[in-house]
Amino acid sequence: MTIREFWRSVEAIHDVVYFAPDAKERYEAVGLKGFWMGYAASRSAALGTPGPELVTALFHGFAPRLIGRALPDAWSLASRDDVLAVRLDLARDRLAAAFGERDVTRAADALSTLASRIDVAGRPLAAAHRALPVPDDALGKLWHAATVLREYRGDSHVAVLTAAGLSGVSANALAVAAGLVDARQREVRGWTEDEWIAAFGRLQQFGWVEGTTVTDTGRAARERLEEATDRSCGAGLDQEATARAYALAHELLPLARLVEESGAVSYPNPTGVPRP
């Protein structure tokens, strides 16, 4: 069992809210317009009612024009509290369907304790989600903790990507070249064809791609980015918290696989995170 499997399991548990078949309908029920507005508003609502510039910066991989389609209009259409409640209910329903009668109380308590111990300095999305009330029920608590930790790794990864000189579009282009996401990632994340071509041109200057195909150098560079993210995440965990994460991997991995088996999360998907 490796620490990477822990992070991938956390990702799978969190990701159920992105692939719920009724997500669009539920967000529209509280006033939002369509799935994309629901995604952008619900993921950023932990911050309050942020504008598109801030959300674009924190999400990193999405084109500014795509964020601008959802924000700030979402906040005039729906209550922040309603948006957060819909997202949590989506998570509960998807996890309940995946886990059946399985008792996840112990895993939820342990993961919540771990989420409370991480150092969130420099990790704004993780900090904002941790500041939200912790649900009383096991499924809600498990998802809340997984979300804090998922955004903690995501914040760390964005810092690594930007330090390596990768813009949002370049990071997505590299993920496509490396086979981590579907070729439709450009459209999913809102980038134009010209922006996509320019991104591959930059990657070619690095020697990471030839055309749109990843090179051995590029594949090695992509792995170094993941290793740097692992180190960044580890820096925010003390010795006890690190030991907890390793121990929890044994409990979370079967849960993450139940999530996949239920169809709540499929692979590959736009997050680019491999299956646990």
Image (cartoon, grey):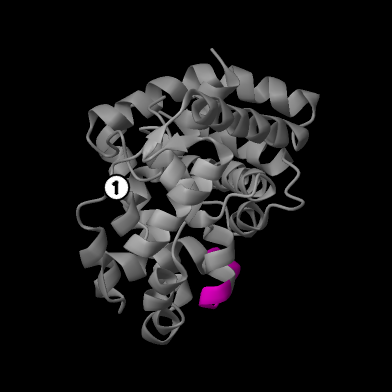
Q: Which of 189 and 48 is in front in this view?
A: 189
Q: Report the amino acid beneath label 1.
A: Asp
Residue at horizontal 61 percent and vertical 46 percent from the top: 161
Q: Where does the image place residue 141, in percent across and percent down from the top left?
A: 50, 44
SS category of the residue bearing label 1: helix
Q: Taking the image as drawn, is residue 234 in sight?
A: yes
Whether 40 is drawn above or below 261: the answer is below
In the figure, is residue 217 to the left or right of 89?
Answer: right
Residue range corresponding to the magenta coloring: 46-53
Say which quarter of the image contains residue 113: top right
Say which quarter of the image contains residue 103: top left
Q: Nearer the viewer, residue 152 or 178?
A: 178
Residue at horizontal 38 percent and vertical 75 percent from the top: 70
Q: Where does the image place residue 3, in percent across and percent down from the top left?
A: 59, 22
Whether 78 is drawn above or below 132: the answer is below
Which residue does the numbered mark 1 point to in the structure image?
93
Q: Which residue lies furthest to the top in this view?
A: 1
| Residue 34 is a magenta residue | no
Q: Taking the image as drawn, is residue 14 in sight?
A: no
- Binning the other alpha carbons within 10 Å of mark 1 as few (below 14), some (14 to 19) or many (20 upward) gives some
Q: Where does the image place residue 240, in percent across and percent down from the top left?
A: 76, 24
